[in-house]
Amino acid sequence: MAKGNEEGAMWSIFGYLLSGLVIWGGIGWALDNWLDKNFFLLGGLLLGAGSSLYLTWLRFGRN
Amino acid sequence: MRRFTFEEAGDGFIPPSTADFDLPPVFGNSEFTTKPILLVFLSVILISVFFVLASRKALVVPNKLQFAGESIYAFVRNGIGQEIIGQEFMRFVPYLFTLFTFILTNNIFGIVPILQFPTMSHVGFAYVLAVFTFIVFHWVGIKKQGLGKYLKAIAFMPGVPKPVYLLLTPIEIATFFLVRPLTLSLRLFANMFAGHLLLLVFIMGGDHMLQGVIGLKLIAPFAFAFGIGMTFFEFLVQCLQAYIFTLLTALYIAGALADEH
């Protein structure tokens, strides 16, 4: 995004963090239910949080 | 709509709830004559009349009405359109301007005496607006870059090792097609809903205390004072939410226009 102000960047980052958690947490939760385990949800949430932070850095951190 | 009766007053305070948002039809027995829907029509009429009057006899030295109209227009055009979208902003100004004035008017209905209901506290209205924005920014992106290239730009961030796409692509797709319209509409809805509930708590609570014992009667003015204070606060929130919705729409359009994110 060439132009954009702080507010917009803030909400974009919020969107990334949210969808990271929802998507990978959701996949983990589905795996938990399917395989009758209990650690995929946590793994998925961590993975999602990590990758959305990485994505945020890619989009806003590097020049 | 719930009204306090004197019999009810002794039975303890019934806090405002989501039931207070289920309004009966104003007239007739149709679900299309409820207050929020009539408010939407009213807002369209008000906005049209205001801007037709404000721009009808455009003078070089504007009168008050023209000045007010032009200020709002200039704010959206320059402050949001030009600032965020850049070069091609002019063709999006009508949409942004409509969006801003429509949301602003409907939000402010929440604190206008008698009307006193923010239309957007019914989530359906906010969904529709988000769908419009969703269609506009994707359409703009597809038209500008072509469907394949546009989707590729969304899904595959350049300069990332290939295996990482497995992690990032689902997040990108979810962000663009799910989280963006959802957060856009829910932010507007939740702010209006919560604000209306907050005002109900203070005003109805004050009203309830007025009907209680003498000790409660003495506290009631504070509840009303808080209610009035919150009304000013709500005005701020209502303007801010209209602004943020328009701003984010402009940002999404700008993102879709950019060749590379």
Image (cartoon, rainbow, N blue to C red):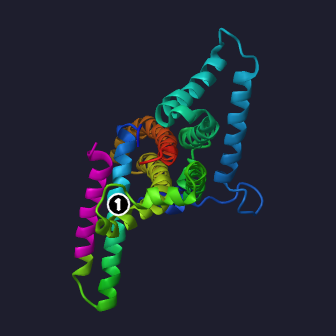
Judging from the image, mark 1 belongs to the subunit labelled: A
Residue B151 locus on image (x, y percent): 50, 60
Residue B117 locus on image (x, y percent): 57, 47
Q: Which secondary structure, mark 1? A: helix
- The residue furthest top is B61
What residue is rendered at 71% in x and 54% in y? B26
- Quadrant the C terminus of chain A occupies: top left
The magenta segment: A43-63
Residue B86 locus on image (x, y percent): 50, 33
Instruction: Please say if B123 is above or below B230.
Output: below
**Number of disc labels:** 1
Out of B261 and B56, give the one closest to the viewer.
B261
Residue B180 is inside the magenta segment = no
Q: Is B232 situated left or right of B126 in this image?
A: left
Q: Disc 1 marks which amino acid? A: Leu
What residue is rendered at 53% in x and 53% in y? B121
Q: Is B120 situated left or right of B42 in this image?
A: left
Q: Which residue is mark 1?
A: A18
Residue A46 is inside the magenta segment = yes
Q: Is residue B199 visible?
A: yes
- Quadrant the N terminus of chain A occupies: top left
Q: Is B63 situated left or right of B245 in this image?
A: right
Q: Is residue B214 visible?
A: no
